Amino acid sequence: MSTPTGMFLINNASLLGVKLLEHLYLSLSATLLAIIIGIPLGTVILNRHALKNTVLSVTSIFQTIPSLALLAFLIPFIGIGFKPTIVTLTLYALLPIIRNTFMGLTGVPPESVEAARAMGFTRWQRLRLVELPLALPIIVAGIRTATAMTIGITTIAAFIGEGGLGDFITQGLSLNDPRLILLGAIPTALLAIALDFIIAYIESALSHRQRQLMKYKKIKLTFIFILLFASLYLMIDTIIPTAFKSKKNTIVIATKNFSEQYILGDIMADMIETRTHLTVRKKFNLGSTAIIQNALLNGEIDLYPEYTGTAYLTVLHHANLVSAPQIFKIVKKEYQQQFNLIWLNPFGFNNSQTLAVRADFAKQHRLKTLSDLAVISPRLTIAAPAEFLKRPDALPGLKRVYGFRFKRVIQMQPDLIYQAIRNKDVNVIEVFTTDGRIPAYHLVPLEDDKHLYPPYYAAPVIREAFLKAHPEVEKALAPLAGLIDEKTMQHLNALVDIKHESPEKVVHDFLVEKGLIKLSPQAGEK
């Protein structure tokens, strides 16, 4: 397989295996939990009309809530990672299991129940020996539906750093790489089909040979559930140990959801892995500043790259702008006082934000500054990430300082906004000045002539408690201080966004070039 696609599959084969097992672990855990809750609940509501209506209505309501919205709602209460993912998936899997359990039990022939009653069976004996076995094919059909649905929804786990095949999809969207999207989507679909086939076989066997081989079917089903639980235990013990074992010598590094953050996250990860004895666990693509900030405060992550301007305006809610050195001093001091978080020395570059238009559009309308653009904004459509709509240094600030009134504001993933303006679907996009796609797509960043935006110097932010326990981290990251200027960062971003090189390879090559790590014999295979 010497073709580019073949090499891509070979290079990602081992990671695909890990992500597949993570996906199985999450989806099967949620399905099993839904079975444990759903079948007893479906049994309890059998002869309780009011309770039946309440339970089925509530579980139906959960089905109507978008999975990502439900996940986001749970984050402030139970954090990121495994817990909110399992809760969300379980809530979605409950309805078909509860409903089919109820339907299966109500469909049991009355003469079978009467015969059991005449033989002196207790209520529990009738349920266990007569009703549940007869209802089992319908119950299994509900489990089949829940399993297929859960396999698909599990991709949302990637949005809060819990892994699975969704990691490939979110990275593919962020990096504009269709290969990564397909690497996540196709195995997800195949996994759902495979499990659906297995459960369909069980369902068919139960339906056609139930009476003759009921004893053997019970043994088979018991064996299957034991096998599933054993598989889960094996995965917990070997594949995903970091979620359940000691984190004493593990550092969790997080990033937001765009290329530059992945690059900075990998730079810090490589430096720590090669210069300390710590094991690095990556939780990249967590999304917004608010999600990462909460995760950091809850101790779910230890380190991530942040920008001084974002911290100053969005987190600390300062309004008055001061010089770059003053902003860093204020941010460093107040983060430690308020959050017990430490800002280490900045990487060196300022990634300010602004609005950009196509070069031909700028020439046609003689646009050079944001003030120029504000005049014609009522006729224009802008595309920007979700944070742009609410952050004080984004759309609210542009309205307040420049008087912007766009005809339409479209919310998109960070990478898709560049596709939109290149295809002329929108007139304006929000950009960060170190983005490598600005020159590649012939865009013109407009001057912030009224000084809305503060400086956005990137720097590592780490939990103070973790740094005290592992002071070697600061020493490992010290060579990065002032190492990366705006031109260098834009070049690294372009390698990922335009040439579609993996962030890991780009980072490895950069650190080798700077003499900070040794050349890895497997670097070319990343």
Image (cartoon, rainbow, N blue to C red):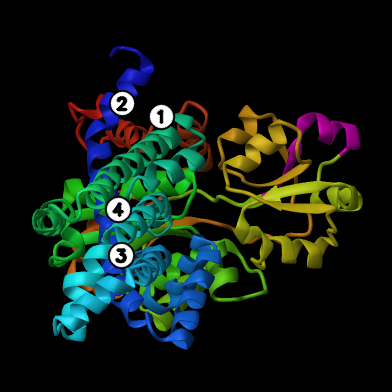
| Local secondary structure at mark 4 | strand
Q: Which residue is mark 4?
A: 282
Residue drawn 20% across and 54% down? 210
Question: Which is more toward the observer, 136 or 521?
Answer: 136
Question: Which span of residues is magenta-colored?
Answer: 354-366
Which of label 1 and label 3 is nearer to you?
A: 3
Q: Residues within 10 Å of mark 1 (few under 14, many from 20)?
A: some
Q: Is residue 291 magenta?
A: no
Q: CA distance from mark 1 to mark 3?
A: 30 Å
Residue drawn 63% across and 49% down? 412
Q: Which residue is mark 3?
A: 82
Question: Which is more toward the observer, 445 or 168?
Answer: 168
Q: Which residue is mark 2?
A: 9
Q: Which residue is mark 1?
A: 501
Q: For the residue marked with disc 1, what is the amino acid? A: Glu
| Local secondary structure at mark 2 | helix
- Which quadrant, please, contains the N terminus? top left
Q: Which mark is residue 268?
A: none
Q: For the residue marked with disc 4, what is the amino acid? A: Lys
Q: Is residue 406 left or right of residue 464?
A: right
Q: Which badge, 1 or 3, comes first in the chain's sequence?
A: 3
Which of label 3 and label 4 is nearer to you?
A: 3
Q: Is residue 359 magenta?
A: yes
Q: For the residue marked with disc 3, what is the amino acid? A: Phe
Q: Is residue 420 left or right of residue 31?
A: right
| Relative to 91, residue 118 above or below | below
Q: Are marks 1 and 2 in contact (CB under 8 Å)?
A: no
